[in-house]
Each structure stands twice: as C-alpha cells, then as structure tokens.
Image: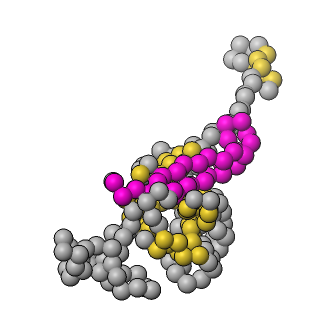
Amino acid sequence: VCSSDLSGSATEQYAAATVVSNSGSVSFDRSVYPVPFFGSGGEATTSAGDLRTGANGETGQAEAGNVTMTITVEDADFTGDVMNVTNANTAGTILVKLIEGSTTTTCFTAGSATSGTAHTSSSTVQELGPLSETEIGSAVYEVEFTVDEVQHCGDNMRTITSGDVFQVEYVDTANDSGVTSTSYDSSTFDLRT
C-alpha cells in the first residue's frame, strides 16, 4: 500500500499472514483399567454373577462393576467449546476398538455433532457425540463413557476379560505439516488393578 506520511513523504506498508495447523493427539485417562464384572443378577443371558462371598455364595453380592473411561483429544486447530469431527446424524471419526487376541471390533465412535443412544440390540455402533472442552481456550476436549463386562460392539456382543485392549484412534485432518495423520492410544484391562 502506498501512502504519504505527515511530512508528505511516500511510505509503503506491508502485512503478512500465516496459516498454521497443529498436530492433535488422543489418549485414555488410564493405561490400565479393571475388568468390568456383574453382580449376582448376572448378565442378560445367565443368572450367575462374578462376585462371591468367602464361602462361594452369591447372597448380598449384587453390585455390578462397570468401568468409566475418558478419552482426551488435544488439538489447537479446534477453538470452540465442543469438538465435532463430523456433522449430526453421521458417526464420529474417533474410533474406540476392543482388541481380543486377533479379533478387533469397533465398540464406540465419538465426535459427531449429536450423540446416539445406548445400542444394546442393533447393529450400529454407539456414538458418544461431541467432545467437551475441559477449560475455555485450552483446546483439550474430553468424552466419557461406560464399559460393561459384556459390551455391545456394533452387531457383536463381546465379553471383556483380563488382557483385552481398548484402542482409540483419532484422525487429524490437518496436522502441523498440513496433511492428515492418525494418532492412537491404548489401554488394557487387568484383574490386578
């Protein structure tokens, strides 16, 4: 831009702009979770529970032990108070998979603009919905979900046992190099926690 200053001398002014993207990451809140269990009410297909008294009785052992897990995504490219990676009525692209030996099954998706209902008898994977920012301006987003001993994973019912692994996958569509990259984290289920 050419203009004159107060003395009438010509001046030139320049402005520069830079477009920057940042790499995102994903993590679970723990690296090891306890194995979920049923109380004496058992699961839908049996009446036996996992908890027993010292004499192997089930009386008074009705508590169920589901496990609450939290996924955290850090990505400075998102600036709102919620993180949506897809539109409403479309499954999120953040995937939570159960790995049992050589079998891998997607159990949850996250990041859609809306959350789905708990799916216990359909063939769709449960959508956890948008992630919420933990603190204004932090670019750290979380979503929490509950895992049962027998977990609905799409059209499969899976029993979680010690040694199974949950893996979360986050696709960053514009990392610090400006290209798509995928981040992973995993946690195991263990009876010793």
Residue in the foreground of this view, choosing between 129 and 57: 57
> Is 81 situated left or right of 14 in this image?
left
Q: Is residue 22 above or below residue 68?
A: above
Residue 75 appears in view? no
Residue drawn at x 20%, y 82% is: 59
Residue drawn at x 33%, y 54% is: 193
> Is 136 situated left or right of 5 in this image?
left
Report the quarter where the N terminus lies. Answer: top right
Q: Is residue 183 magenta?
A: yes
Q: Is residue 138 magenta?
A: no
Residue drawn at x 66%, y 47% is: 182
Q: Choose top left, top right, bottom left or bottom right for residue 53.
A: bottom left
Residue in the foreground of this view, choosing between 91 and 34: 34
Q: Is residue 53 above or below residue 28?
A: below
For the view shown, which residue lies furthest in the front direction? 55
* Predominant SS of the magenta segment: strand
Scheme of image coloration: secondary structure
Q: Position of residue 63 (x, y in %)?
A: 27, 75
Residue in the foreground of this view, choosing between 144 and 44: 44
Q: Position of residue 96 (x, y in %)?
A: 56, 60
Q: Position of residue 183 (x, y in %)?
A: 61, 46
Residue 77 appears in view? yes
Q: Position of residue 84 (x, y in %)?
A: 60, 60
**Magenta extent:** 165-192
Q: Is residue 131 above or below residue 122?
A: above
